Image: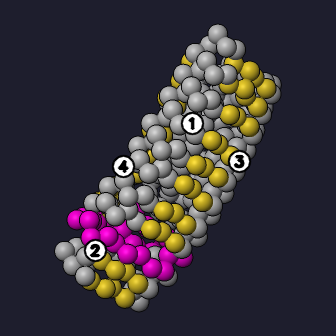
Amino acid sequence: FFLCSSLIEATIPSSVTSINDQLFENCKSLEKVTILSSIKSIGHSSFNQCILLKQIEIPSSVALIGSYAFNSCSSLTEIKIPSSLTKIDKCTFKDCISLVNVIIPDSVTFIGDHAFTNCTSLCEISISSSVTKIDDYAFSGCSSLTKILIPSSVIEIGKFVFNSCKMLNEIALSSSLKIIGQCAFYGCSELKEITIPPSVNRIDSSAFSSCNSLIKLTIPAKIQIQGLGCPKQTNITRY
């Protein structure tokens, strides 16, 4: 069905167990897809660029969703990720600019690079308590995101993860966090205060560059503060 520009609705029959790579890619008129519980996997780019897709329910039978699966589904407002999924692959929901709400189930342990990049309507996201790593650029450009709780399972935040999350004003970091990547909070211009837990042993360069409202940073004494990019007015407390 690649490039079937007139296709509006599709139902995957029960005899099918896998949605192949790029199956509905660039079906620009596709608005609704019904996926039955026989489906085990959704291939990469399977719904890429389905710009009118508003509604899709992923059954609990799905254990794998490939990269770019829903990339640029710009009309998709909500997605429920099934508890059978263990990772969110790279660019899965990239450029889903109407996506408002996402709940990541406890089965998920890894959020891939660019997974939610430029989801500009995403206000809040609940991250599962099993996630151990949030990879590079995962939430970069989520300009409506206001708060986020990083659960205690997360040990690494990759580079540019919250880059240009311009409305982010509240973040609670994992008590098990060890690594904060380069430019992780670059351009979070509404972030006023952040406390780095004692578990952190590495913060890469420019982690807080262009955080122009950052007035208080509480950070372990073992961490080098040079090169973090904090603005001049930031009151840094070491412990």
Q: From what the image shows, is residue 90 above or below residue 135?
A: above
209 part of magenta stretch: yes
Q: Residue furthest top?
A: 15
- Quarter of the image that includes the N terminus: top right
Q: Which residue is denoted by mark 1 in the rendering?
A: 82
Q: CA distance from mark 4 to mark 3?
A: 26 Å
Chain-order first, disc 4 or disc 2: 4
Chain-order first, disc 2 or disc 3: 3
Q: Which residue is denoted by mark 2 in the rendering?
A: 227
Viewer-proximal residue among 106 and 159: 106
Q: Position of residue 229 (x, y in %)?
A: 35, 76
Residue at figure coordinates x 54%, y 59% from the top left: 141
The kind of secondary structure element at disc 1 is: loop
Q: Which residues are magenta?
A: 183-210
- Quarter of the image that includes the C terminus: bottom left
Chain-order first, disc 1 or disc 3: 3
The kind of secondary structure element at disc 3 is: loop
The kind of secondary structure element at disc 2 is: loop
Secondary structure of the magenta portion, mostly? loop
Residue at figure coordinates x 73%, y 44% from the top left: 75
Q: CA distance from mark 2 to mark 1?
A: 41 Å
Q: Position of residue 158 (x, y in %)?
A: 36, 55
Q: Position of residue 129 (x, y in %)?
A: 44, 51
State which mark lies toward you, 4 or 2: 4
Q: Which residue is denoted by mark 4 in the rendering?
A: 132
Whether residues under marks 4 and 3 lie with C-beta atoms below 8 angstroms apart, the answer is no
Residue 151 visible? The answer is: yes
